[in-house]
Amino acid sequence: MTDRNQILFDRAKTVIPGGVNSPVRAFRAVGGTPRFITRAEGPWFWDAEGRRYIDYIGSWGPMILGHGHPEVVEAVQAAVRDGFSFGAPTEREIELAETIIRLLPSLEMVRLVSSGTEAGMSAIRLARGATGRPKIIKFEGCYHGHADALLVKAGSGLATFGHPTSAGVPPEVVQHTLVLEYNNVAQLEAAFAEHGPQIAALMIEPIAGNMNFVRASVPFMRRCRELCTQHGALLVFDEVMTGFRVALGGAQSLYARLIPGFEPDMTVMGKVIGGGMPLAAFGGKRAVMEQLAPLGPVYQAGTLSGNPVATACGLATLRVIQRPGFFEQLAARTRALAEGLKAEADRAGVPFSVDSEGGMFGFFLLPELPQNYAQVMASDAQRFNRFFHGMLERGVYFAPALYEAGFVSAAHGEAEIEATIEAARAVLPTLAA
Ligand code: PMP
């Protein structure tokens, strides 16, 4: 066996569970050998065999400028020279907080943390602390990080309290987490009718990127807002993936355009705001955020929170994406990819549906775009796996699971999009049979 990826994978498996530090990297869903990445540049990365791939995962979202953007590299290098971490406040943390608040007007204050998991977990604690209520609503197919209370799947029947999706989470820990079907207004209304005064927060991915790419419908989102307001629950947008990715103002700016006066009460962010460094955040209105320690009774902290290198990376990234025309061009590239793939699938007679927003996209080997998790999971996994491996062999690295979204960066040029469509032109006809 001479494949360097396989050699590294075998070696990794002896010292790291499954050979990876985050499960989806192991290619368990699609089979085969994960590629060990040695370096990346612009829209590409290279594996241990020296093979180059067009990268459509972008570190699962953060790399919106592509890899190694010169301005970001320079900012990070300068920051590193001044010190890696101080455990004391810095001016860059203020700058980043000010930038986030300017770009997301629903926020008045923000706190920086190091991962989306931490941000989601802290937002839930704060929502419970601020409202004095125990229950939270989440939706099947949405992922908000791996905090215990959020690792829940729907029980059988409507609007039931969920079951842990992971061993090691006692049922009592998720007894206050209500799991509902995404885009299901009737279930939502029933849940509030039954538990309204107990509900601290409703947490939602406004465009659910952890079941590939499923939009919350406008009537559904409107009801989420109305019911939260009516019952005094906080509407928490998980924009870890969509924030600064689907639009400069996040998914909330898109819903604000469709629902007059719309805004969430709290927002959870990550990925793009760190530009590839460990950085995430949660924010909301002042009255709620001031419940946090050291001002208020809700405890939350972090040794590396607001890390000076990470904030430099995030600030440089946010600076570039604010330039005029940035999102128009990114969205046009992403649409060109989506439309190109769709045209090839149609030609090959393969059922295919695709959607995109800004630099995020999802495609399904299904005739219609799904509206919820059950519909996503009705996809033909075997067929997806053949598509994934066919594309991978041709140097195109899509997410190695059918329930993951894809990402286009500003470094993906017309040539990369065209090469991707050309690869699909070769692979899709092999799926038709
Ligand atoms: N929320 C969403 C919407 C996510 O997509 C993710 C990660 N994919 C998280 C939270 C958790 O973020 P992290 O992996 O940084 O903990």
Image: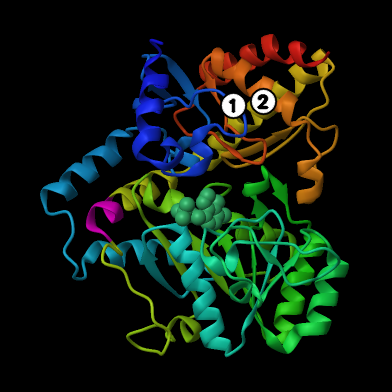
Image spot of residue 5 (x, y percent): 40, 20
Residue drawn at (32%, 47%) of the image = 316
Q: Farthest residue toward the front?
A: 14
* Residue that numbered label 1 is attached to: 31
Label 2 SS: helix
Disc 2 and disc 1 in contact, CB within 8 angstroms: yes
The majority secondary structure of the magenta stretch comes to: helix
Q: Is residue 403 magenta?
A: no
User: In terms of depth relative to the viewer, which is nearer, 124 or 262?
Assistant: 124
Res. 385 mark = 2
Q: Is residue 309 magenta?
A: yes
Q: Quadrant of the N terminus?
A: top left
Q: Is residue 88 left or right of residue 265?
A: left
Q: Is residue 388 left or right of residue 348?
A: left
User: Which quadrant of the figure has residue 41?
Assistant: top left
User: In terms of depth relative to the viewer, which is nearer, 356 or 7?
Assistant: 7
Image spot of residue 429 (x, y percent): 76, 11
Question: What residue range appears in magenta?
Answer: 307-312
Label 1 SS: loop
User: Which quadrant of the figure has residue 295?
Assistant: bottom left
User: Which quadrant of the figure has residue 320?
Assistant: top left
User: In terms of depth relative to the viewer, which is nearer, 159 or 283?
Assistant: 159
The numbered mark, 2 or 1, whose residue comes first in the sequence reads 1
**Tag 2: residue type?**
Asn
